[in-house]
Image (cartoon, rainbow, N blue to C red):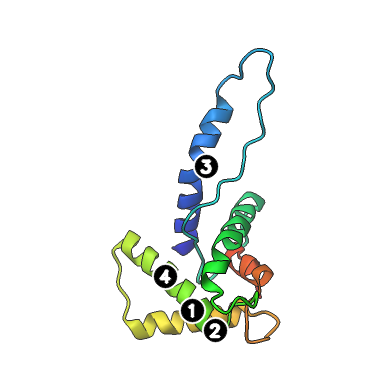
Amino acid sequence: MLRTLLFSTALAITAPAVAQEATAPQQGTTPAAPQAATPAQPGAAAQPEAAPSGQANTVASIVESEFPAYDTNKDGQLDKAEFSKWMVALKDQEMKATGKTLAPAEVTAWADGAFTTADTDKSASVSKPELVAFLSGSAG
């Protein structure tokens, strides 16, 4: 579900760029390459599957822009509390979008499982590359 939210957000943000690219360029000019959009809200997958490279690039952009907001101690890694805060925010977005609800204990258990999966080197923290891999569906 979170993967769907991520994809939908990325699609909604990139749709204007795709529409512009589809229009005929003015004579004598070369169309510019589309620029990657950076969504304001990140997305995640509880059980990631492999993502197409375009989606992986979008995930990397999201992680790059949002990571500092959740890395409260500014050490370049997300500890379990920092990671869980981000994942709970994502789960809340998904639940609002789908109208579903989960008990707080279920959300906490989900975030704990996501942390265990994302922390592929078992360092008790999640780096940007680990987070991109997790959200892209290629972790663990």
Tell me the crowding category of disc 3: few under 14, some 14 to 19, or many 20 or more residues within 10 angstroms, Cα based: some
**Residue picked out by circle 3:** 14
Can the viewer see residue 49 in this picture? no
Residue 5 in sight in this render: yes
Q: Which residue is the site of mark 4?
A: 89
Residue 35 % position (x, y):
62, 40
Q: Amino acid at mark 1?
A: Ser
Q: Is residue 89 above or below residue 9?
A: below
Q: Which residue is mark 1?
A: 84
Helix, strand or loop for disc 3 = helix
Q: Secondary structure at mark 4?
A: helix
Q: CA distance from mark 1 to mark 2?
A: 6 Å
Q: Position of residue 31 (x, y in %)?
A: 66, 26
Q: Which mark is residue 11?
A: none
Crowding near the residue tagged with mark 2, few <14, some 14–19, many ≥20 C-alpha atoms within 10 Å? some
Task: Say whether marks 1 and 2 touch (CB < 8 Å).
Answer: yes
Residue under label 2, please give it: 80
Quadrant where the N terminus is found in the figure: bottom left
Query: The disc labelled 4 sits on which kind of residue?
Result: Ala
74 or 38, which lies in front?
74
Question: Along the polypeptide, which appears first: circle 2 or circle 3?
Answer: 3
- Relative to 75, say whether 99 is above or below: above
Element carrying mark 1: helix
Q: CA distance from mark 4 to mark 2?
A: 14 Å
In space, the residues marked 3 and 4 are separated at their CA atoms by 23 Å
87 sits to left or right of 125:
left
Q: Are marks 4 and 1 in contact (CB under 8 Å)?
A: no
* Along the viewing direction, whichever of 25 and 109 lies nearer the viewer: 25
Q: CA distance from mark 2 to mark 3?
A: 32 Å
Q: Is residue 29 above or below residue 75?
A: above
- The reply to whether the C-beta atoms of the residues labelled 2 and 3 are less than 8 Å apart is no
Q: Residue at x 44, y 67 (%)?
A: 90
